[in-house]
Structure formats: C-alpha cells, structure tokens
Image (cartoon, coloured by chain):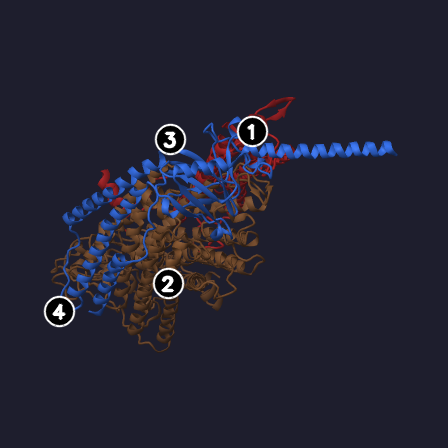
Amino acid sequence: MSDEYENKSGYQAQSSEALTGSAGSAPDMDYVRPAELPEQDLYHGHTFLTKWVFCQDAKVIGVQYFLTAVFTGIVGLILSWLMRLQLGFPGLAGFITAEHYYQFVTMHGMIMVVYFLTALFLGGFGNYLIPLMVGARDMVFPYVNMLSFWMFFVAVAILMASFFVPGGPTGAGWTLYPPQTILEGTPGSGMGILLMLISLALFVIGFTMGGLNYMITVLQARTRGMTLMRMPLTVWGIFTATVLAMLAFPALLVSAIMMTLDKVIGTSFFMPTILKAGEVLEYGGGSPILFQHLFWFFGHPEVYIVALPAFGIVSDLISVHARKNIFGYRMMVWAIVGIGALSFFVWAHHMYVSGMNPWFGFFFATTTLIIAVPTAMKVYNWILTLWRGNIRINTVMLWCLGFIVTFVNGGITGIFLGNVSVDVPLSDTYFVVAHFHMVMGIAPVMVIMGAVYHWFPLITGRLLNETLGKWHFWATFLGAYSIYFPMHYLGFIGVPRRYYEMYDSPYMTSAVGMNEFISLAAFLVGAAQFILIFNIIKTLKTGKPAPKNPWKANSLEWHTSTQPPEHGNFGERLPVVHRWPYDFSVPGAKDDFIPQTTPPSEVVHTKVEKT
Amino acid sequence: MHAGIIFFLVILGSILFHIFTPWYWTDIASNWKGMDDTITLTFWVGGGVFVAVCLFMIYCVFKYSYKEDRKAEYKPEDKKLEKILTVATTLGVAALLAPGLIIWNQYVNVPKNSIEIDVMAWQWGWQYRLPGNDGKLGTTKVVNINDDNPFGINLDDPYGRDDVMVQSDIINLENNRPVKILLRSVDVLHNWYVPQFRAKMDAVPGVVTYYWFEPNKVGEYEVLCAEYCGVGHYAMRGGVEVQDPNSYQEWLGEQETFSDLLAKQNKEIETKKVAKNNSNIEKVIYKEEK
Amino acid sequence: MSDPKIDGFELKPGFRGMASDTGSDQTMFKGVHWGKAMMWIFLLSDTFVFSCFLIAYMKGRGSTPVEWPNPSEVFALEAFGVPVPLLLIALMTFVLITSSGTMALAVKYGYEKNRKMCGWLVLATAIGGLTFVGMQAYEWSKLIHEGVRPWENPFGAAQFGSFFFMITGFHGTHVSIGVIFLFIYAYKVFAGHYENGGKRGWFTTMKGDYVEIEILGLYWHFVDLVWVFIFAFFYLW
C-alpha cells in the first residue's frame, strides 16, 4: 500500500529568492519565511472506491457533503410544501393529519438547521474551500475527514429511516422539549425520537472529526506568507463557526444522551412527576428547564454556526464582484470573532417566557442587543464595499444583494425578539417563525446560491447560465420575501406557531387570505429551485468552459495548477502569499486585481497598501 | 439597472404594506401598553435602519454598476467612519434596550394588590382555582390529583379549604384589578396566552411559574396554548371573561369551594355508608326472618 | 525538550510580539505537531462535554424534591469490620493519578528514544487504567447489589443513581478507550514503529514518531483530571 503515497519527504525550505527568481528588483522586498513543515504526504486512491466513495481528498469530501446536504434539503423543502398545503388550504390534502403535520414541522426544522445548513456550510464549503484558500495540499487528517463524512452519511440515513418506523418520525418540534418529546400524545414518541437522538449524536461525533480537521488546517497548515490577517473572510467565517460548533455541540450531545436515558431506561433527568390519563408516571424530580438550557446553549451558537460562514462567503463574493477591496477588513474579522464569542452568552433569550428565573431576562437581553453592534458593523461594511465600487450586476451579485436585504430585515426583527419585554407578546407566534426564516433560512440560502454560481466554474470548469440564474434569483428572492415579510404580521395578530389549523378563532379568520397567499408563494419558491437543477444539468452537458479565474479573483483557490484543481491542489509547489485577497482596483496596477501570490516587486509602482 | 428598480419596489412595497396592512395588533385589553409602545419605537428605529441600508444599497447599484472604464476606489479602511458608525449603532441599540428593560422590570415585579389565580394545564385543557376568603391558595401536589380532588390540594393545608374551584376552561376576571397568574402543569409544557393581554409565560411541570397583568377592557377573550404540547396543541383553547366588579362578585359567589366539594363527597360517602348499613340491617332482618 | 527552532522566525517581546507571533504565517503554534494540536482542541471540546454533564448534575442535585443521599455512607467500604468512608474511591484515585505519573515518564523516555523504558511505562499505565476500570466495575456491582439503579435507589433522590451511573459510566468509557489505545501503543513502541524515521500508521499518512506517545499522554492526563472533578463533585460534596 505504501507505494500509493507520494514520496515527497524533505523540507520545501528554499529561500524566496530561489522560488520567485526576482533578481532585478530588491530581493528583500519579496522575502517570505521558508517553510516550517515538510510537504504533506497524500494518499492517492486508484480504485473507484478509494477515488470517489471512500475518498480522502477534501474536495471530493466537500462535494459529497454538499450533495448529501442538498438531498436532505430537498426532503426538508418537500416537508415545508406539505406544511404550507395544510396551513393555506386546510383539508385539501386529507392525509395530512395533525400527527403528520407536527412530524413535518419537526423534521423540516431539524433537517434544515442541522443536516442541511450546518453540513452544507462547514462540511461542504469548509472542506472544499479551506485547504484551497489557505494554500494547503489537503486537510491535515484526510482519513479522519473521510470518516467524518461517512459518519454524517450514517446520521442522515438513520434520520431518514425514522420516516419508516412504526409511529413515524418524531413530532416534538425541532427543539425536542421534554417532557412531551418522549411521552404519548406526541407523534413518534417511540422509535421516532430514539432514531432522532441517535442520529444527532452520530452527527456530533462525525462533525467533531471534521471540525478538528478544519481548525487544525487553518491554524497549522497555511502556506508560506498566509498570515491570519491575510486569510479570506470565508475562511475566517468557517473557522470561527467551527470553533463555535466544537464548543456548542457537546451540549447537544449531553442532552441527547440524557434524554435517551430518560426514554429508554426510565431515568428522570428532565422528567418531573407527571400525571397522564389519570395515572402518575414512574418519573419524578427532574427539571424540564435544564434541557432547555442545554439545548439553547447549543442552539444559539448553532444560529451563528450557520450565519458566520455565510457572512464570510458573502464578504468575498461582494468584494470580488464589486471589484473593490472589502471595506474595513480588520473590523470584519473582529466582528466575526466577537459575534462568535458573544454567541455563548445569549442562549437564554430563547427562554424569556420559558418559566426560568425572570431575572435572567435583564442579563440576556443586554448581551443579545450587544451582539447587534458587531452584526450591524458587518452590514455597514458590506454596503460600504459596494459604495464607489465597480459593481458587476451578475447572478452572484444579485444573490449577495438579496442576502443584504433579507439579512437586514431579519436582523432588525431580531432586535424585537431579543429585547426581553418586546419578546413577551411576540414569542411563540408567527413573528418568530418569520424572523428566523428570514435571518437564518433565506439569508444563508441566498449566500449558498451565490456561492454555487461563484464557485461552480472552479468545481466543474463550466460557467452556469446567467439568464437562468437571474430567473432563479428573482423567483426565489421575491417569492421568499413575500412569504416571510407578511408573516410577521400574523405574529402581530397573535397567531401562535405550531398550530395545525387555526381558523376557528375569530381574530385569526382575517388571516385566511394571507395564509393562502403565503402558501402559493412557498410553492413557487420551492419550484423555482428546479431552475437551478436544470441549469446545472444543462451546464454540465452543454455549458461553455470557464476560462481560468473567470471572475478575476485574488484568492488562492483560483490560482491552482489546474481548474478544477487536482488532488494536492497546487501542483509542484505550494503558492507563496504576499498580500491579502482584496487588492482590487489598486491605483497604478495593470489589471484591476492583484492575486495574493503576486510578489511586491512586481507591483512596486502601484499604491498598494501593505497587508 | 432593472435589479435596482426591483429592489426599490420591494422596499417601497414593504413600507406600503406596513402602512396599509389590515393585519395588525388586536386591540390591547391590559396594562401592557408599554410593550406595544416599545414595539412601535423599535419599528421606527429598526424600520428606518432597514430602509436606509436598502436605499443606500440601491443607490450604489444605480450609481456604481459596472463600466469598463471606471475604476473602483481603493481604500481598505476608514477608521473615522467606522468609529462613528459603531458609536451611533451602540447608542441606537441602547435606546431600544432601555425601555425594554424598564418594562421587563414591571413585568417581573407583581403588584401587592393582585389576585392570585392558579391556572392548571394538562394535555389538553385548562382549569382554574381562586383563593377563598383568606386570600391564599392552598398548596398542591400532582400525586394528590384524582376525581375527588381535581386540583390536587393538600388536604392538611388549611388555606386550601376555601379555595374557589373553576372546573371549566373559562375564567372570569375582575376589570382593572391586577391578576397574578400562577401556572402549573401536570404533564408537559403549556403556555396560557391571551393575545389581547400581550403577556404570556410557560407552564412547566414540577414548578410554578407566574406573570401578571391588569385587564382593563370588559369582554370575552380566547385563551390559546402558546407552547407546543403534543398533538392536541392547536385545539387547546380556553376563555377569559373580563367583567365589571359587580358581575364578577356575583359570578364568584356561584362558584364551588374545595370544602363544598369535600362536603358533597362526604355526604356521598355517608349516604353510601348508610346505604351499606341499611343493607346490612336488612340482611340481618332477613337472616332473623329466616 | 528545547524549544524547536523556527527558521526565520523571532519572537518579539510584549503584547505586540504575541500578536504578531499568533497571527504569523503557516502555523499559529510554532513547532506543534498537527496531531498534538488536534488532541488539545479535541480535549477542549470534551471539556465542554464533561462540563455540561457536571453542570447538569449540579442543577439536578439542587432541584430534586427528595433529599440527596449522603455520599460518605453510600460509598463506604467495610475494612476489617469498620466502615471506612471513601476507601475504594481513595484507592481508585490513587491508582489513576499514579498512572498519570507513569505516563509522564513514558513520554520523557520516549523523547529520549529509550524504547524499552518507554514501552514498559506505557504498559504500566495501561495496567493502572485497567485496575481503575476493574475497581469501578466492583463499585458499580456493589451499588447495584445494594439496590441502586439509574431510575431509583433506596437512599434518596432517584437522580443520584441516574447521574452517578451516567457520568462515571461516561468517564469509565473514556478510561477504557484510553486503556485500549495504551495497549496498542505499548505494542507499537515495542515493535519499534517510532524508531528510524518511523513507520506509517494504520489510518494515517503520517509517519510514526514518539510525539504520538505525548498525544496519548495528553488524553490520559485529561481523563485523570476529569476524574478529580468527578471525585470532588460526587464523593466530597
């Protein structure tokens, strides 16, 4: 087996002069410290199985993650259709009983948050982009990385299996609040919830394996010259999100273990004395609120696990397509890190009316609104990047603009809900549903779509069709906005969430028309995603080949030896980095972009700032 | 160019929707007008920021869309601008937070003269208990609950005897008198929520949670369960009737107290005993006759 | 060990130096093996797992309506006819802490390329861990014999048994996994996988190096440290 390894031992420690060969200009100017670490040995698969299935190349693993996550996302999308069918047109589909409806709600929520968004951003984009962007050959532990994906795959398989067990999947709401989660009276309180908990535990274990890879690759495997403050914001976002995940998922794991024990062997961690159908159950002395604390200690950072990679990616996309450096890079980095750190101190804002000690409200409202400041700074910096730029209004940029609109909208409603006493009338109503869909559903999806259009040429070597892309964008953006913007007003009326049907109350009948409209918009948005699928299939078959670095970007992933990059990414030699990835439109430069690998001696006559 | 126009129409549409929406708050029927005011304030500030940010973005799209001969500005940082924006945002956020905290302070401090109401929730229904003449509710235990003691009141608690029991999902409240809702659940999480009162809190099994409000509008309202509690969640409704003091007292007088219930049960037990004795006597007589 | 010399890299003094050191290119932790950095971060994550368990335990213990059992009575062990509180636990803790000592020595001899000593010490550590697991099994069976179950116990609050079995069980699993790896690594040391430039591992493209003994040692010390906290929370509180 050992002959399958590249035999590239020995340090790559030549001086930069030898590498760049820039003899004429001042050589000191281009000096970059020699390599600290020997070249990474890579395992090259030869069979179909080791090349495409149990592959150790982070890029293939990233695509595997991406496709699996998209599959779960499609399941989640179909579930949302069924839900909207019931809410907009109750009784039209007879098979949607209350039990089924609650199962759809639960599975939709869990799938979208954990198995779709988290896996897609960290597993998908993280795997594909981190090694490329920091200039590494691969993730530092390729074998563990491969195991990580397959663990995730098993978790997804178990999750999907729960649709087919007796009693169906759990219908406890994605928050899985005990005691109802494991009691009769909640759909799927038998096998369904058990499979859900097992699947979550496996997801956490699988993610930990991946997360260690992402973190060590960013911390310890960057290429020469790639300082922390020269990393693209995408890497910063994914990296910080991974740190959050490594520290937040333990709480989910612990609560899953404890709930499994409550369910299976009858411990009472979360179960107080319960009277059910006239009989006192064999539980007693547990605390349901403890679960909520554990769950939200995971759950709130989870929101930022989804949001931070989106922040990072969108910053890069905006900068590249506005042909302008990202405004206030250092501020952006510190905002990402600050948001990440603060996100561990705000979890109980999901619990203002949960019956916890009400005095917590003061603390958590304050911390929550503090988080608004760095978040607002990021928004300002995005629009200030557009300002005085040279903006290409292409599909990628449209998704970014859509992200800004939906994210600001959802962020502002977050200020309503974070402000403790404003939350009281609005919590547990459709206002909450509208808020979190806007801010962590639609906004990150906008970024994902933008990223797909942006990096598709890198991954496949072909450019997606722009016209179809624009149709796809407008249908999705306008549709999604008209789902969730009016939905806030349902919350103002006081319509509670998680109601199977609600027209028997006098003041809710006024919302019938709006519910029908929202449902129709939801069907449209879901259907619009098939434009993308069609576009991808069409492009793969007949699309025009992309030129190298089609967007004229600076970051390393576009400066690989081949496009799409091969295993090992950079060919013979790893790139040497001399600048940040945002040197666009530098006065005096020949092109409007200066790749990260361009040594200073080649751009002495420009007014480039040292980074 | 068309992109900027569509985005502009979206923003304009949002504003118009907000102005002309027929869907808005139900008329408030409690003292929590402060919550509504804070929401309105947040709406003005937040909505203003939303519109400003989006309009600026649209302006950029119009003004700076791609031209071959234009070159974007190269200016990595502007410390002064960033500082101004940070300070302004911080001030804005603080201005929104302050009223929120002030009202929350009122929310967690229950007025002394409020009447306590024990709201008991189960899958899927409500019932209520009011303190009797002593003004205090008796203590309870879930395991005590049975047909004879529907609220699970501890029999040895003297305060419990005169508690007024409302075994219906509709409760009457006195207008302009603060109520402290004490929430109790015997099985899973629930939440006693009346949209017109604005206030809500979860009922958690194992502990008693509370919140308060002061109804100030006579009328009938619907109670909704606002915390997912299983498959019957959407059907778990109740009712509140806010009455003027006179009709309230009249209603209160008609309700059964715990001792009434106990007395009734004792009578039943005694009747049963008497019946049993009688039958014994009859048997004896029968025997003797034999 | 002397600090590894990083070519072309000089530490600057003060906060600024620290910042530029941290943010420099290629690596954040200079000269730190990838596997070692991974283990540290894994342990950080695992710390959160155990913290969640212990915080849940504190909250659970604080809020049960039934009284918590008295640990010094429950965990007493009869020795020469006298019940000595915490005797078994004291022994278990002693064994585990000792095994940490042998592990540290193994790392030292490993870096000195003393294959024999290193191997024996890793083996000694493994045997220490095995003894610990054995004693824990004895303690569990004793408690089960006395009627303590995860869902009930004769001494008081039912949560006592739940938390005890769950947390010591979770820790015991960590120790057991550690013991398995210690045996494997003892074999690898004796077999010379870390000598002469090292042999490739089973699941990795990296070549063996005595740093792996240190990485395993990190895990082992962590498991011991967690035990100290469990000891304090369950037996002394």
- The residue identified by callout 1 is C69
Q: CA distance from mark 4 to mark 1?
A: 81 Å
Regarding residue A228, the answer to whether it shows in the image is yes
Disc number for residue A513: 2
Q: Amino acid at mark 2?
A: Gly
Looking at the rendered structure, whether the residues under marks 3 and 1 are on a common chain is answered as no
Q: Amino acid at mark 4?
A: Asp
In the image: residue B89, left or right of residue A129: left
Residue B74's quadrant in the figure?
Answer: bottom left
N-terminal label among 4 and 3: 4
User: Callout 2: residue from which chain?
Assistant: A
Marks 4 & 3, CB-CB < 8 Å contact: no
Q: Amino acid at mark 3?
A: Asn
Marks 4 & 1, CB-CB < 8 Å contact: no
User: Callout 3: residue from which chain?
Assistant: B
Q: Residues within 10 Å of mark 2 (few under 14, many from 20)?
A: few
Q: Amino acid at mark 1?
A: Pro
Q: Which is in the foreground here, disc 2 or disc 3?
A: 3
- The residue identified by callout 4 is B69
Visual hue assigned to chain B: blue
Looking at the rendered structure, whether the residues under marks 4 and 2 are on a common chain is answered as no
Disc number for residue B113: 3
Marks 2 & 3, CB-CB < 8 Å contact: no
- A411 and C127: which is toward the camera: A411
User: Callout 4: residue from which chain?
Assistant: B
Q: CA distance from mark 2 to mark 3?
A: 44 Å
User: Callout 1: residue from which chain?
Assistant: C
Chain letter for the brown part = A
Q: Position of residue A134 (x, y in %)?
A: 30, 56
Chain letter for the red part = C
Regarding residue B210, the answer to whether it shows in the image is no
